[in-house]
Image (cartoon, rainbow, N blue to C red):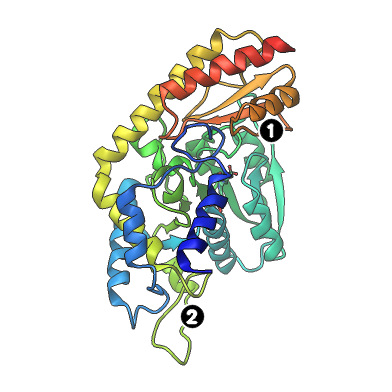
């Protein structure tokens, strides 16, 4: 088979799945990457970011990315790196926590935390005490306070939960974390909240040790590209390892790392800057409010709770049936079995026109019973 034929087959395979461009994917936290960011990935795709001895330029790009993200979270001292995504960032953060408190065995996290927290704990022989949520599905700070004891090494809170986009009460939780490691998973909300200015997520929280913030969600970069940011460089130093056979110091969870991911994030940040991201986030929030207004007019559908950011939980009387029918109509929706709702993520590719078409189909689907 010649390359042209191989690529034709590949395009054909891709064509059988939906694309963001059509706008029908409404339950995913991913979106179409910026074209210039994708080009950056291609230019650096042969660069192994592990080997900064061989490829020193990628180290400079990564340092600039981390400095920009640090300034976004008001911490010029922040130290971290570009990861493969939220899962790696959460594991790395809790790995650092374990280094700080090697004798402690418990992580405290609200039930809404991403399941990568469980993975991290399980990998390291730790256990998670899952704490309650309030009636708006945010972490209950009192329940976290109660769960913290001498065996607790870390508390995890989320800024933009996976299911509903809720922002946990970070300031209140921060008050309970004087003696433990405090990690905030802002994989999704990290590229939203600094631009809305509605809820604080920054290193002014005195106990905050680390933050997960993923460019490959609202940061408009190709997958994979996440990041983890520590308060300062001491955390990474504690994880550092230098192999005998190459003169590079590595504190990262993965060995070989994609130079493409780093270049892609660097270019997205340079291309959009704070103002560019703010324009994108403002539009997503405007569309989120539009969706909520439209839903108010549909009998049989309602908001699970008032959204904190551009993720909306839509409660339905017959969630399973409605979800299946919407999927038959070509909508990329997914059912949340715990809550009996669908998650609608108002990503940049989800325009008002898409929302209008969706709400028309939703209303008709519900009417059919
Ligand atoms: N933390 C939070 C709060 C998340 O929402 C996610 C991912 C992670 C960590 C883990 O990030 P990585 O997937 O980058 O490791 N949440 C998405 C979700 O559960 C993952 C996803 C993405 C699912 C696109 C579906 C999809 O189409 O929704």
Distance between mark 2 and mark 1 Cα atoms = 41 Å
List x then y, in percent, for residue 115: 66, 49
Position of residue 92 measured from the top left corner of the image (x, y, whole percent): 54, 63
Which residue lies at the image location 62% right of the left edge and 68% below the top edge? 102
Q: Determine crowd level at label 1: few under 14, some 14-19, many 20+ residues with C-alpha closer than 10 A.
A: some
Residue 82 found in image quarter: bottom left
The residue shown at (30%, 35%) is 278
Residue located beneath label 2 in the image? 241
Extreme bottom residue here? 245
Quadrant that contains the N terminus: bottom right
Which numbered disc flags the more N-terminal residue, 2 or 1? 2
Q: How many marks?
A: 2
* Residue density around tag 2, few if under 14, some if 14–19, many if 20 or more, within 10 Å: few
Q: Is residue 135 visible?
A: yes
Q: On screen, 25 above or below 230?
A: above
Give the percent coordinates (x, y) of residue 83.
Answer: 47, 61
Q: Quadrant of the C terminus?
A: top right
Q: Quadrant of residue 122?
A: bottom right
| Depth check, front residue: 100 or 241 | 241
As drawn, 1 above or below 127: below
**SS under mark 1:** strand
* Residue 336: mark: 1
Residue nearer the viewer, 287 or 239: 287
Picture quarter containing residue 105? Answer: bottom right
Q: Secondary structure at mark 2?
A: loop
User: Which is in the foreground here, disc 2 or disc 1?
Assistant: 1
């Amino acid at each position: 088979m010649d390359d042209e034929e191989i690529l034709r087959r590949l395009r054909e395979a891709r064509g059988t799945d939906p694309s963001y461009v059509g706008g029908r994917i409404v339950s995913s936290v991913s979106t179409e990457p910026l074209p210039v960011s994708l080009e950056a990935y291609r230019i650096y795709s042969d660069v192994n970011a592990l080997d900064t001895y061989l490829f020193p330029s990628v180290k400079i790009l990564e340092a600039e990315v981390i400095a920009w993200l640090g300034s976004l979270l008001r911490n010029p001292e922040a130290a971290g790196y570009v990861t493969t995504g939220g899962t790696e960032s959460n594991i790395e953060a809790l790995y650092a926590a374990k280094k700080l408190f090697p004798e402690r065995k418990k992580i405290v996290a609200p039930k809404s935390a991403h399941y990568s927290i469980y993975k991290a704990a399980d990998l390291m022989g730790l256990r998670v005490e899952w704490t309650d949520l309030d009636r708006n599905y945010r972490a209950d700070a009192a329940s976290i306070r109660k769960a913290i004891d001498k065996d607790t090494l870390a508390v995890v809170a989320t800024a933009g939960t996976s299911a509903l986009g809720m922002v946990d009460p970070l300031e209140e939780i921060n008050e309970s974390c004087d003696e433990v490691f405090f990690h905030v998973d802002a994989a999704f909300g990290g590229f939203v909240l600094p631009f809305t200015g509605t809820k604080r997520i920054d290193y002014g929280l005195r106990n905050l040790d680390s933050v997960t913030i993923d460019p490959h969600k609202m940061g408009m970069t190709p997958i994979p590209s996440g990041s983890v940011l520590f308060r300062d460089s001491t955390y990474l130093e504690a994880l550092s390892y230098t192999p005998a056979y190459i003169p590079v110091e590595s504190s990262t969870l993965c060995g070989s790392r994609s130079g493409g991911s780093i270049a892609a994030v660097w270019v997205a940040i340079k291309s959009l800057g704070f103002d560019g991201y703010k324009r994108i986030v403002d539009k997503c929030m405007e569309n989120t409010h539009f969706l909520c207004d439209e839903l108010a007019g549909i009998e049989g559908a309602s908001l699970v709770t008032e959204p904190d950011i551009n993720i909306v939980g839509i409660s339905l009387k017959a969630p399973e049936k409605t979800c299946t029918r919407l999927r038959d109509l070509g909508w990329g929706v997914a059912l949340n079995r715990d809550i009996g709702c669908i998650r609608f993520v108002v990503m940049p590719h989800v325009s008002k026109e898409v929302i209008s078409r969706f709400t028309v189909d939703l209303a008709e689907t519900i009417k059919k019973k």
